[in-house]
Amino acid sequence: MAEKIKSFGVDCWLDEKDLEGGDIIPDEIIRGIDACQEAIVLISPNSVNSQWVSFEIGGVRAQHKRVRRS
């Protein structure tokens, strides 16, 4: 999905790409949200119960940015 998004010339934050060992995950997620204008949150059977997906959606909504759920 990240490759598809990048093909439209849009940069995307992706944990696998943007997190490094020792990073404080909530701080890095908020940093990514701060930098975006809109967010696409992918929800899969594996992520539907993830605390991080809920945290990301809440962070985007708290900043009154548009959230697209896929």
Image (spheres, helix red, strand yellow):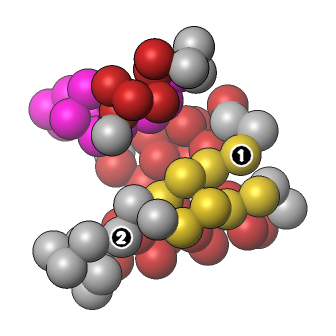
Residue 10 location (% of width, % of height): 58, 21
- Amino acid type at circle 1 is Glu
Q: Which residue is mark 1?
A: 38
**Which image quadrant for residue 50?**
bottom left
Residue 35 location (% of width, % of height): 67, 31
Q: Which mark is residue 3?
A: none
Position of residue 29 in the picture relative to residue 34 (left or right): left
Q: Residue at x 71, y 46 (%)?
A: 38
- Amino acid type at circle 2 is Ile
Crowding near pointer 2: few (<14 within 10 Å), some, many (20+)?
A: few
Q: Which residue is mark 2?
A: 43
The vertical placement of 4 against 37, above or below, is above
Range of magenta residues? 11-22
Crowding near pointer 1: few (<14 within 10 Å), some, many (20+)?
A: some
Residue 55 location (% of width, % of height): 48, 70
Q: Residue at x 26, y 71 (%)?
A: 44
Position of residue 63 in the picture relative to residue 34 (left or right): right
**Which image quadrant for residue 4?**
top left
**Which image quadrant for residue 42?**
bottom left
Position of residue 68 in the picture relative to residue 52 (left or right): right
